[in-house]
Image (spheres, rainbow, N blue to C red):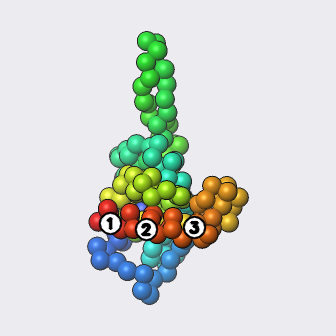
């Protein structure tokens, strides 16, 4: 279809020097931060939107793909398959299984679940050219996150938080 069929292309793009001051911000809970909801939220007044929490391991196991049909940027999981010669190869999984999807100009903050500074940096480097900011989730109370030392679990580990944040600030633009 033409550009009129792609609702995200009719929204104003993010500004280069953006801030949180005076903005309407959508920071959703689990399974409520997909691109369609973010587009609707922008249409109804959200200035900045957050992705749902994506675990650092998950984004590290993806490949960035420019989806020309939908004019989106998809981070598609890679899977290992064994060839006929028993050699391991990496192959893209279905593009419908995007771990994270955005579009050029979306005012998106990538929300990451992590408990390790080096892995957080590697994960942030995967998406940093396609997002406005990186957020380390320190509030999720779900058992998976807390048990793994992520989300609210980080609140009892200030030295880990400090290491993660200092590593990200020192190494990202």
| Residue at the (62%, 69%) spot, across then down | 156
Asked which secondary structure carries label 3, the reply is loop
| Residue at the (28%, 73%) spot, across then down | 16
**Mark 2 Cα shell of 10 Å, populated few (<14), some (14-19), many (≥20):** some
Residue where numbered disc 1 is placed: 170
Residue where numbered disc 2 is placed: 165
**Residue 13 locus on image (x, y percent):** 34, 69
Instruction: Using the rendered view, name the quadrant where residue 18 is placed.
Output: bottom left
Question: In this orientation, does residue 109 appear?
Answer: no
| Residue at the (52%, 58%) spot, across then down | 114
Question: In this orientation, does residue 107 appear?
Answer: yes
Q: Is residue 171 above or below residue 19?
A: above
Q: CA distance from mark 1 to mark 3?
A: 20 Å
**Residue 64 locus on image (x, y percent):** 38, 46
- Counting every numbered tag in the picture gives 3
Q: Are marks 1 and 2 in contact (CB under 8 Å)?
A: no
In which quadrant will I find the C terminus? bottom left
Looking at the image, which residue sits at the far top? Answer: 85
Left or right: 113, with 6 as reference point = right
The foreground one among 128 and 12 is 128
Q: Point out the tag, 1 or 3, that comes first from the N-terminus.
A: 3
Q: CA distance from mark 1 to mark 2?
A: 8 Å
């Amino acid at each position: 279809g033409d550009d009129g069929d792609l609702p995200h292309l009719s929204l104003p793009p993010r500004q280069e020097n953006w801030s949180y001051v005076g903005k309407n911000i959508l920071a959703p809970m689990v399974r409520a931060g997909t691109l369609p909801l973010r587009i609707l939220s922008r249409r109804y007044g959200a200035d900045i939107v957050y992705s749902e929490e994506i675990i650092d391991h998950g984004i590290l196991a993806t490949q960035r793909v420019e989806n020309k049909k939908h004019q989106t940027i998809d981070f598609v999981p890679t899977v290992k398959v064994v060839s006929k010669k028993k050699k391991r190869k990496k192959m893209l999984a279905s593009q419908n299984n995007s771990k994270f999807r955005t579009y050029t100009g979306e005012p998106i903050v990538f929300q990451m679940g992590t408990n390790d500074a080096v892995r957080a940096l590697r994960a942030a480097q995967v998406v940093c050219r396609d997002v406005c900011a990186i957020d380390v989730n320190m509030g999720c109370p779900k058992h998976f996150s807390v048990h793994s030392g992520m989300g609210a679990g980080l609140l009892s580990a200030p030295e880990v938080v400090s290491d993660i944040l200092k590593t990200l600030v020192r190494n990202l633009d």
